Amino acid sequence: MSEANYLLGQKVFQIIREDIIAGKYRQREELREIAIGDELQVSRTPVREALRQLELEGLVTIVPNRGAYVVGISCQDMKDMFEIRLLLEGFCAGKAAKSATSEQLEALEEVMVLTEYHIKKGHFRQLVGLDNKFHEILYEAGGSRILEHALKNYHYYLKQARRFSLLSQGRASSSVQEHRRILEAVKAQDQKKAEDAVCQHLIHTIKNIDTYGWENISGGQKNGKN
Amino acid sequence: MSEANYLLGQKVFQIIREDIIAGKYRQREELREIAIGDELQVSRTPVREALRQLELEGLVTIVPNRGAYVVGISCQDMKDMFEIRLLLEGFCAGKAAKSATSEQLEALEEVMVLTEYHIKKGHFRQLVGLDNKFHEILYEAGGSRILEHALKNYHYYLKQARRFSLLSQGRASSSVQEHRRILEAVKAQDQKKAEDAVCQHLIHTIKNIDTYGWENISGGQKNGKN
DNA sequence: AAAAGCCTGATTGTATACAATTATCCTTGG
DNA sequence: CCAAGGATAATTGTATACAATCAGGCTTTT
């Protein structure tokens, strides 16, 4: 009750978003402002703002004077996002090869060193965060604000998937090797090689998820609540 | 004052968005809720909701407890969006070649016929709307909700650019020929040819804009208000 | 005179009040 | 018995009230 109960709007947005992605609500379930507000101990105002934002993200549909309905994310949606990300991130890596600053290259190198260290030590917990960081730096290095914005958005949704994907020892170490290859291509300013390296990396990631099954990562959109 | 002054929230959002894209505000200008509310004759509530949505779109930055600041769109941003659209729309056309329904093909054909008619008659006004419609149907035909959402978003921003691009007689008729080629490839379910046709079409569109100058389509982000 | 601290005005963040709309159920007429 | 219409309750849309925060200027102290 000290400082955490201010600036609720942004927090409410994130909570509802996570809940939808996690599959807390069933498809097309109605989200009532008062009910959610009661649950989160806030008034309707922050909830309304959150719902409006979620509509823009495509996670809910708002019917005027009627209410907000959950749209949610299916397995197919996840796969589609991955395909789009594959295209855009390859493109981004190519741009990064041309425009990455020395600071960005250094930051990437630092993440790589840390990753390699934790792999050796078997510290799997740290890997998820480092993997995310590697990709996010790459997005910045592309030098396009727009592209970065789009990629970060897809990346956010696919984080859940990535977490599963890295769980296996074998995948973790091959993943880090692929990162290394990406970084070297970017450093060498070899546009085509950077693109190819990213595409290969993501294709392998997708294949890895395929073996685990996409159903496990998209919050069970089949029927059940929770 | 009958029914139009209800459901203001969505309207306010669209107005502010258009204003920002049109360059009404200067870069980093502060958007005060009360001032905008007074201007649009509404209270702070709808304005706040709009600003929160605009932040998600990347058009404003909100500093907590401080205010909303215009981010705006530069020429470079427009070019970047076009590049992204090029990638995604090519991909989408390829998917459409596989998954388009007969209704969608028919709708595309209808738009084409109308377009060719208006071209012959020299009715340039109608062309912009038809061109937009052609692309939007194509987005649906791709069969990916996610991809469609992304493309419609970029398409919205680039509409202004497109309007300029179609003004010239020569460009209009070559554009419709390119559309025809896209449609035939999709009909023939030739994935690669569809992709190529869309890419060619968009590359030509970009070149056409290049000759007119990107400065004219992105609301003068150089310095001036207005 | 300079710097630190406080006060005040302005603005945002949240909650609540009120208006408008919609859905549901009940009544009523055929 | 069924359909049409209206009253009512619930929910959203908007406006306003109040609380919290911040910037700027003023005073005070060293």
Image (cartoon, coloured by chain):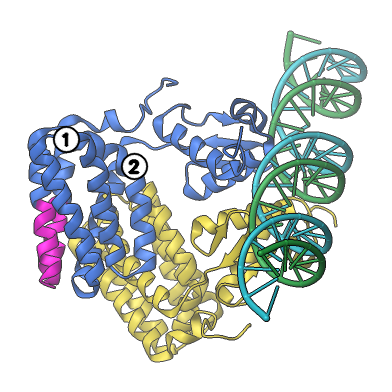
Chain colours: A blue, B yellow, C cyan, D green
Q: Secondary structure at mark 1?
A: loop
**Label disc, if present, on residue A123 of the rendered structure:** 1
What secondary structure prevails in the magenta region? helix
Name the residue rendered at 51%, 76% in the picture. B160
Residue labelled with disc 2? A77
Q: Position of residue B145 (x, y in %)?
A: 39, 47
Name the residue rendered at 10%, 63% in the picture. A184
Residues tagged by mark 1 and mark 2 found on one chain of the structure: yes
Q: Position of residue B87 (x, y in %)?
A: 28, 65
Viewer-side residue, A75 vs A19: A19
Q: Is residue A226 magenta?
A: no
Residue B121 seen: no
Q: Position of residue B31 (x, y in %)?
A: 65, 66
Q: Check disc 2 and give the amino acid type.
A: Asp
Total marks drawn? 2
Quarter-of-image position of residue A50: top right
**Label disc, if present, on residue A63 of the rendered structure:** none
Quadrant of the image for the N terminus of chain B? bottom right
Question: Closer to us: mark 1 or mark 2?
Answer: 1
Viewer-side residue, B219 vs C6: C6
